[in-house]
Image (cartoon, helix red, strand yellow):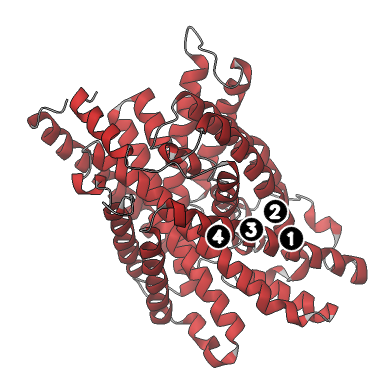
């Protein structure tokens, strides 16, 4: 445990953060972070039975996630969120590992958001630059440029950054709603484009089941608000309201958007990077409303920018708190003297994401395979951090004597058990290659080696900085 000097340093740095987030900011933060339309084509490409996987994940993973976040944020409302919860309950090492898996998962996920943005650009631009959609160099240059633009925008503080998140969340809501409405109009006018029996589960297909991990990953994000606990106005009141509203909206948008895409585009023709616009393009042409494509593309672009901003800023807060705890270089714990932001942590996240974008194209991988591999790596690391989330809740639920919190003992016990089981399943199936993977052996090598390297590096860094803390008299 840290001494009073370390605790005082953390409290002093946190005091420079500004409480600017209200209930609606948290609601739109949840929507823009969770309801990422870029994962919908990856999931829909596995076929209509994925709708059932969505429903299973909503009940056994997403609902328990909401209960966990609200309960733990009630008990530990300070900056750091999931990192702080694991640290308080399991100790410093596990807190560090939880935080490490959380922010490193977003090193992989943020590039997939930017890949999707570039896919939208190439699709709407037409044949003039359409060939660039399969060019790794084009994707690298554009994604890295967008990444650093988002990073510098976040340096101006949450008072500014929250509006990027809010506008992005509203853009997500409108874009997904238009997609769902178009699909409903198509069914009303032309009937079902796929037979109802295709939604029935007739056999076990591991390539379909592998999408369950991506579905669970698509549903993470309710914990993002509490990570910024010292930047929320009245967190004990606003966090539960924001989590509830954002969770309900996100779940409904995901199921509706996936079903709409399945009705719009034949499974075998669905493109993982451009699938949403592909579906909208086809439906608007049949309905005589082709003018909707460009405005919707703009809305999805705004949504992606907001999501990138949300995950970048949230992950940087984990780096920031790890720096304050001195389990990573102390420079990550610095706050910008003018803007009150963890500027070094933000720049560090962007630099490491840039390296991973370059690495994702190693071995002559296509853009499509690089995208899917980055997404699956993000799934595994995020599920590891969620094992700590549900494990923390389990400790709270089964402690003796039980201390009352936001929810009763029975509800949080069920949530902890359900969350742990579905998280383990989601992590395991992420190692099963999906239909988009062309080289299975290369996919598995990248998955296992990258995960082992990142977890080994985490252990080595913790051991090194623990010794430095002891020598400095911080423990």
| Residue 425 drawn at (x, y percent) | 54, 40
Q: Horizontal placement of 360 versus 184: left or right? A: left
Q: What residue does disc 1 label?
A: 177
Calculate the distance from the C-alpha at mark 3 to the C-alpha at mark 4: 31 Å
Give neighbour class at mark 3: few <14, some 14-19, many 20+ (Cα, 10 Å): some
Of tags 2 and 4, which is closer to the observer?
Answer: 2
Asked if labels 3 and 2 touch by Cβ distance under 8 angstroms, the answer is: no
| Residue 399 drawn at (x, y percent) | 47, 13
Of tags 1 and 4, which is closer to the observer?
Answer: 1
Of tags 2 and 3, which is closer to the observer?
Answer: 3
Identify which residue, 470 or 275, lies in the foreground.
470
> SS for tag 3?
helix
Asked if labels 2 and 1 touch by Cβ distance under 8 angstroms, the answer is: yes
Q: Can residue 376 be spotted in the picture?
A: no
Q: Which label's residue is closer to the chain start, 1 or 4?
A: 1
Residue positioned 76% across, 50% down in the render: 202
Calculate the distance from the C-alpha at mark 1 to the C-alpha at mark 3: 11 Å
Of tags 3 and 4, which is closer to the observer?
Answer: 3
Q: What residue does disc 3 label?
A: 170
Residue positioned 36% across, 40% down in the render: 99
Q: What residue does disc 4 label?
A: 434
Q: Which mark is residue 272?
A: none
Give neighbour class at mark 4: few <14, some 14-19, many 20+ (Cα, 10 Å): many
Q: Which label's residue is closer to the chain start, 2 or 4?
A: 2
Residue positioned 31% across, 25% down in the render: 91
> SS for tag 1?
helix
């Amino acid at each position: 445990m840290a001494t009073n000097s370390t605790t005082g340093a953390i409290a002093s740095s946190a005091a420079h953060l500004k409480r600017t987030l209200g209930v609606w900011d948290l609601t739109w933060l949840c929507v823009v972070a969770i309801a990422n339309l870029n994962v919908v084509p990856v999931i829909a490409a596995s076929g209509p039975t994925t709708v059932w996987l969505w429903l299973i994940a909503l009940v056994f993973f997403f609902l328990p996630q909401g209960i966990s976040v609200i309960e733990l944020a009630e008990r530990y409302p300070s900056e750091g969120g999931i990192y702080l919860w694991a640290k308080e309950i399991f100790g410093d090492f596990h807190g560090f590992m939880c935080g490490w898996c959380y922010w490193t998962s977003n090193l992989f996920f943020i590039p997939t958001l930017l890949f999707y943005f570039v896919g939208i650009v190439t699709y709407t631009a037409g044949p003039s630059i359409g060939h660039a959609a399969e060019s790794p160099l084009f994707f690298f240059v554009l994604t890295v440029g967008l990444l650093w633009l988002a990073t510098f925008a976040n340096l101006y503080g949450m008072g500014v950054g929250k509006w990027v998140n809010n506008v992005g969340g509203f853009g997500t809501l409108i874009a997904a709603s238009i997609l769902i409405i178009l699909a409903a109009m198509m069914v009303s006018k032309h009937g079902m484009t796929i037979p109802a029996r295709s939604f029935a589960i007739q056999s076990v297909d591991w390539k379909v089941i592998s999408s369950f991990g991506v579905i669970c990953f698509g549903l993470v994000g309710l914990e993002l608000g509490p990570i910024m606990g010292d930047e929320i106005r009245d967190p004990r009141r606003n966090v539960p309201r924001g989590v509830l509203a954002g969770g309900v909206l996100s779940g409904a948008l995901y199921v509706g958007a996936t079903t709409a895409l399945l009705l719009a585009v034949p499974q075998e023709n669905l493109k993982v990077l451009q699938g949403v616009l592909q579906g909208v393009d086809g439906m608007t042409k049949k309905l005589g409303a082709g003018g909707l494509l460009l405005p919707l593309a703009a809305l999805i672009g705004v949504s992606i920018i907001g999501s990138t901003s949300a995950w970048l800023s949230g992950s940087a807060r984990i780096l920031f708190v790890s720096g304050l705890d001195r389990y990573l270089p102390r420079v990550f714990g610095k706050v910008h003297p003018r803007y009150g932001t963890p500027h070094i942590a933000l720049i560090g996240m962007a630099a490491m994401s840039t390296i991973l974008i370059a690495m994702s194209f190693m071995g002559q991988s296509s853009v499509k395979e690089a995208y899917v591999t980055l997404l699956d790596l993000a799934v595994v690391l995020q599920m590891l951090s969620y094992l700590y989330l549900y494990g923390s809740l389990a400790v709270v639920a089964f402690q003796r004597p039980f201390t009352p919190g936001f929810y009763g003992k029975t509800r949080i016990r069920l949530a902890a058990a359900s969350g742990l089981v579905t998280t383990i399943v989601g992590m395991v199936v992420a190692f099963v290659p999906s239909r988009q993977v062309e080289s299975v052996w290369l996919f598995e090598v990248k998955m296992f080696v990258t995960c082992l390297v990142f977890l080994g590096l985490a252990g080595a860094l913790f051991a090194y900085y623990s010794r430095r803390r002891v020598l400095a008299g911080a423990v």
